[in-house]
Image: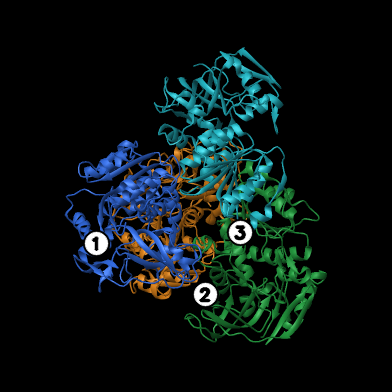
Chain colours: A cyan, B blue, C orange, D green
C-alpha cells in the first residue's frame, strides 16, 4: 500500500509499505480523508516538536476518517464496511489520569502520527477499535476528518464551562479558532468577538457568525474589547492562536471572574504574563491539552447540524501531493483554513 | 389608570386605581405586554397557591415588559422612554442566600403578582430599577414579556450544566417545556425528545426542533427512551410538566450518572419516587425555583436570535379580556402555548 | 487452602479449595483481614440481593487486606511481600463510564464476593494488580480492611462537595455512618449531627466527635434539626442508614440550596418522597454507588491520621467463625459497628 | 476618642477624634483587637498601594474584633454588648458581581482602612451591621481579629476545591501561609509541604503540621517536590508568599490536572510565567482576591477548634505603639507571624 513517509525536514516520499493486519482488539481501517494539522506541518518543517523528534522515517497524519476493512479478535462493535472516525490518542486506560477520566493527561498515551507512532497519510492503518467511532450516515468523510480538531474545541468549551447567553473573545481565526467559534456558538454564546492579524481569516470568521472581528495589527484588541463591553471585558476568552501576545491579552480582556482557556501551543516555555491582573480579577486560567471524551459529542454536533465544519476545508489534495499542502502552509500566500488529503477516496 | 383586579375565585374586575409614583430607587413603568402564567390562572381558579392566599383584592401578572415613564431618585441607569423587561422577584440583597448569589432562595423576596404584592395586569407599575432590564432595539414587547419564562429555563439549563453534544428528554410541552426546548437547543443539546399527552403540543415541539416526541398517553416514555438510546437513557432530563408521574419517569429515563432537573410544581407535597434507582445510577436530582441572574443572558439569547420565542404566543387579548384568557386555560378546548395580555399597546 | 463457602441461606461451610495462581496482570494475595459488610450478611440471610442470586456455592467478603505472595506476568508495581488493600470492584476500563472516570457506574464491573465472583473469606485470592494498593508501613491489616467502607464515604464527601466550616446531618450510626462521620470531619465540617435509633450507636457517634445526636425513636429529627439551626436546616445531609424514612427526612432537614447525598440502599424500589420541597428549596439530591478513585485518598487519610478507623472494629473472629459474625448481625443483641474476620493473621 | 492616624510615609500620630454615631443600618463598635496586615505596613512605608494613595490623613486597620456599643435604626440582629468580628469589605449589593455571589469582585466595594475609608486602629468605628458577625462565646478577641486573614484562606481553599486525602504545596510561611496551612488541613489535605526562605518560619510551619518544609534559599522547591512525589507533583498548590518566583514555581510543582491558587500580590504587573507547561499539563490557575461568604465558616472553624489560630499572634502592642509594629515588620530582625494591636482591651 501507498504511504507518505517523512524522512526528515521537508522530505516526504510516497512509498510502498506492507499492509498491516489488525491485532487483538484492533480494526484495519482504509483511510479515506486525513486533514493536515499545524503539528504535521511543524514536523515537516522542523523535524521535531519539542522533545518529540523524527528520528526514523515516520508517517504523519492524525485527523482521519475511513472505512473498516477487517477487525481483529475481540472486536464486537465494528464490522467491515463501517465508516469510522479515528481518535488518534490511545491512553493506557490504567493510570491515575485515565482512571479519573482525564485520559488526555495519560503519560503513556500513544498518539497517531507522533514519533514513534505512524499516522494516517497512508492507505491503511490498524487502530484499537475502542478508539474508532462509527460515522452517522449523513456525515461525509471530510466531516469525519474534521472531528479531531472539533474535539479540541468541544473539550475547551467544556473546560471553560460556557453557559448560554454569555460573551466570548476568541484569539486566532485559523482552523482551531474556527472550530472554537463553532463550539462556542453551539454552547449558546450570544456575543462572539474574533481576533486575528489576517484580514482574510477575519472575513471568514465574520461570515461564520462572529459578531465582530478585531485585526490585532491595526487595533489593540484589549482597548477594543473594553470599549465594546463598557469597560467590563467578556465572560470567556479562548486563546487559539498560539501567539504569546494573544495569551497575554486573553487575561486582559476577561471580565472579573471570567475564564481564560488556553488552547494554543506557545513557542517559548515561558513569557511575560499579567499574573497580578488575573489574581485581582479572579480570572481562571485553564489549559487545554487535546481532548478526552469529546469525539462522540463532536460527532453528534456535526451529524445533527448543530455545528457546521465541512466548509472549513479550503484545499483538498491527493496523497501524492501531501507536501504541496505543507508548502501552502509554509509560504503563507495561498489562503487556507483546513487542508485535507484525499487518501483513497 | 385601569387595572384588572382579582377579588376572589373567578372574579376579575376592571377598575380604575390611582397611578403610583416611583419611590427612591424605583421606576414607573407603563406596562405594554404581560403574559399569563399558569400560576396566575391557578390564583384565579383557586384563590390561592399553597400558603399564598388571595385575602384582599390583588392585581396578578408578572411576565411583563413596558416603557419607563418616570424614575425616582437614585436611579441612574434608566430614563423615561427606555423599553424594559421586569424581573418580578426582588430579593432582600442581604441574607445568606442573596450573598452567595442564589437570590431566588431569598426568604424575603417580594414577588410581583403574588399576595400581597400587586402585579402587572395594570397600566402602570412602580418597580425597583435594579430589577428592570433595558430591551435591545430589535426586541418586541411580546418578546420582552417572554423573558420571564425563558429565564426559568436558562436557570434550569445552568443548574443542569448541559454540555454541547448531549442528549435530553423534556417532559412537558407547554410554555415552560417549550422555552426549555429553546434553552437546551441553545446549550448545544444534539438529541432532544419531548414527552407530553397532548398531540397538538407535541406537534408544536416537533416543529420547533425536537428530534422526536412521545405521547405518554399512547406509549410508555420510559420504554421508548430506553429503546431509542440502546437501553442507556439520556444525559439530561428536564421535568417541566408538573405531573408527578413525569417526575418519576424522569429518573427512570436518565442515564447512569445523568442529571434530572425538576422545574414543575407538583400538586402533592410528596409522592412515590424511584429513589433507589437514582442512588444506584448516581443520577443527580436538582430542583429549579424560579431563577437568579438569568434575565440578562435570556435577553441576549433572544436579541441575538439564539432562541426564538415570539411565536410561542398563541393568543393576544386586551386587558379587559384577561378573564377570557383564564377561561381558555380552564376549558382546555382552545389550544394555546402562551396567552399574552396587550395591556397598553 | 481454607475457604468459607456460602452454599445457600445460612449455610456457610469451611472447606478446602485449590489455591489459585495469578494470571497475566494479577497478583496472588494472602488474605489477612476481611471485614463483614452488611451485604455479606444479606447474602447469608436471604441468599440474594435484588437480581444478584447465590445460585452456586460462593465465597463472600470484599473488605480485605493481605500480603502479595506472587505476581503474574505484566505486573511491575507490586512484588511478593507487599502489604496491600484490595479494591473489590474491577471495571472494564473501556466503556463510556470508565472513560469519563466514573468507573463505579461501569455496567461490566466484576465485584468481589458478589455472584458469580468469589470473595476474600479465603486464604488466598488472585486479583488484578491495578486494583491492589500498597499499604503504608504504619497501617495495620485491620485498618487496611476498613479502607473499602471508608472509600464509600470519601466518594460521598466528594460527591457532596463538602466545604470547610459547614453543617452536616448524618442519618445512620452504623459502620457507614461512622466512616461518613470521619470523612466529613476530615473535610472540615464544623457542625455534625448524627441520627439513629440505637442509643448505643449514638453514644459511639458522640464519642467520635458528633456535636449532637438525635434518637429518631424518641424525637422527630426534622423538628430537632430545625430547632438547632434556627429553622434553616443544614448545608449537607448524608443518608447512611438505608431507612426510607431517613431518606425522606434528609430532604426536610436540608437548608435551601443544600445537598442531600444518599448512600443507603433502600428495601423498596420506590417510596413516598418530598419532591416538591426539594424543588422549591433547590436541594440537590445525589446518589452514591460504591466509589471511584477513592482508595488512594482513603489510604492517605488513614496513614496520615486524618481519620481514625481502627477503633470501629468491635469484634474480631477467625475464619472458621465467620457465621458467628452473621449471627451477631442477625440477632442484634450484641452491639457492633464493624465485625472483622482474621483470615490468616 | 483615640485614633492612630497615618499622615504620610512613616508618620503615624495618636490623636483625639470625635466618636462617631451609627447611621441607619450601622452599629457602633468599640474596637478591642486589630491585627496589622502586610498592606497596612505597605501604606505606612510607601504611602500607597498601587492606585490607592494616602492623600489625606487615614486610619489604617481592617482585621478587627470588638463589642457593639450602640446600633442605628434598622438593625435587628445585633444589640449593645454583642461581641463581633468585622468584615472590612462592604460591597454595593446590587452590581452583577454582588448578584452572582462574588461580591469580592464588586467594583464599588468600600474597604475599611483603605483610602478613603478609615479603619480600626481607633477606639470606635461605625460599620454596616450586615458585615458584623457575632463571635461565639468561646472565641477570644484575638481570635476574632484573625478571622479576616483566615477568611482569605477559607476562600482560597473553596476556590481550589480541595478534597480530602490530597497533596498540597504552600508557598510562603507568613501569616497568610500559616492560615492557609490551617485551612488546607481543615479541608482534609493529607500531605502538605511548605516552602519559604526563612528557617524560623519553616520551623513554625513544621510545628503546625506541615509534613515537610523546603527552604527555597538552600534547595530548589521544584526538584524537591518532584523528588518527594515520584516526579508527579501535587494536587493543589497555594501561592501565599507574593514572590514572583514562587508563583512561577507553583505551576511547575503542580501535578497534571492540578490546581494552582494564587493568593499573593506581586510587585510587578507582569513577569515570566511557564504558561506552556500549564497548558500541556492542564493545570488550572485561579486567583484569590480577598473573600466572599467566608467569615461565617471561618468563625465556625475557629469556634469548633477545627483550626487553631490564636497562637499565630507573636506580638501584641497597645494602640500607642502601632508604629513599633510597623518597624518590626520593616527591620525584619525580630521574628513575627502576626502582630496585633490591643486597641482597648
Q: Reply above or below: C54 against A84.
A: below
Give percent across and percent down for residue B175: 30, 51
Q: Reply above or below: D306 against B253.
A: below
Residue to which mark 3 is pinned: C304
Residue to which mark 2 is pinned: D130
Give neighbour class at mark 3: few <14, some 14-19, many 20+ (Cα, 10 Å): some
Write the residue at 48% across / 41% down. Answer: A185
- Left or right position of C248 against C81: left
Of tags 3 and 2, which is closer to the observer?
2
- Left or right position of A12 against B96: right
Residue C298 shows up from this direction: yes
- Left or right position of D233 against D96: right
Give neighbour class at mark 2: few <14, some 14-19, many 20+ (Cα, 10 Å): some
Q: Residue B189, located in which quarter of the rendered image?
A: top left
Give percent across and percent down for residue A201: 58, 33
Of tags 1 and 3, which is closer to the observer?
1
Viewer-closest of D155 and C44:
D155
Give neighbour class at mark 1: few <14, some 14-19, many 20+ (Cα, 10 Å): some
Viewer-closest of D212 and A46:
A46
Protein chain holding label 3 = C
Protein chain holding label 1 = B
Residue to which mark 1 is pinned: B42
Give the alpha-carbon distance from disc 2 to disc 1, as whole Å. 38 Å
Q: Reply above or below: A238 against C339.
A: above
Judged from the image, the secondary structure of the residue bearing numbered disc 1 is: helix
Amino acid at each position: 500500500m501507498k504511504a507518505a513517509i517523512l524522512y526528515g525536514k521537508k522530505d516526504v516520499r510516497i512509498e510502498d509499505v506492507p499492509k498491516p493486519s489488525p491485532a487483538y482488539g484492533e480494526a484495519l481501517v482504509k483511510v479515506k480523508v486525513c486533514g493536515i494539522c499545524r503539528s504535521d506541518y511543524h514536523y515537516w518543517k522542523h523535524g521535531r516538536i519539542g522533545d518529540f523528534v523524527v528520528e526514523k522515517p515516520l508517517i504523519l497524519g492524525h485527523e482521519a476518517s475511513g472505512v473498516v476493512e477487517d477487525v481483529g479478535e475481540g472486536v464486537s462493535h465494528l464490522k467491515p464496511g463501517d465508516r469510522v472516525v479515528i481518535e488518534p490518542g490511545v491512553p493506557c486506560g490504567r493510570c491515575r489520569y485515565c482512571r479519573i477520566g482525564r485520559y488526555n493527561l495519560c503519560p503513556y498515551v500513544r498518539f497517531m502520527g507522533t514519533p514513534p507512532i505512524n499516522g494516517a497519510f497512508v492507505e491503511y492503518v490498524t487502530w484499537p477499535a475502542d478508539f474508532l467511532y462509527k460515522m452517522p450516515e449523513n456525515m461525509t468523510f471530510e466531516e469525519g476528518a474534521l472531528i479531531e480538531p472539533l474535539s479540541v474545541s468541544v473539550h475547551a468549551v467544556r473546560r471553560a464551562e460556557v453557559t448560554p447567553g454569555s460573551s466570548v473573545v476568541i484569539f486566532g481565526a485559523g482552523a482551531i479558532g474556527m472550530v472554537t467559534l463553532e463550539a462556542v456558538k453551539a454552547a449558546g454564546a450570544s456575543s462572539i468577538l474574533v481576533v486575528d492579524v489576517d484580514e482574510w481569516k477575519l472575513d471568514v470568521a465574520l461570515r461564520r457568525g462572529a459578531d465582530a472581528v478585531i485585526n490585532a495589527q491595526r487595533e489593540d484588541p484589549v482597548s477594543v474589547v473594553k470599549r465594546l463591553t463598557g469597560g467590563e471585558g467578556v465572560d470567556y476568552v479562548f486563546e487559539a492562536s498560539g501567539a504569546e501576545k494573544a495569551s497575554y491579552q486573553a487575561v486582559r480582556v476577561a471580565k472579573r471572574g471570567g475564564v481564560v482557556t488556553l488552547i494554543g501551543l506557545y513557542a517559548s516555555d515561558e513569557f511575560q504574563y499579567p499574573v497580578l491582573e488575573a489574581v485581582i480579577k479572579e480570572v481562571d486560567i485553564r489549559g487545554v491539552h487535546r481532548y478526552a471524551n469529546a469525539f462522540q459529542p463532536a460527532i453528534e454536533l456535526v451529524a445533527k447540524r448543530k455545528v457546521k465544519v465541512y466548509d472549513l476545508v479550503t484545499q483538498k489534495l491527493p496523497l501524492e501531493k501531501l507536501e504541496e499542502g505543507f508548502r501552502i502552509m509554509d509560504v503563507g500566500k495561498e489562503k487556507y483554513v483546513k487542508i485535507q488529503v484525499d487518501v483513497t477516496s
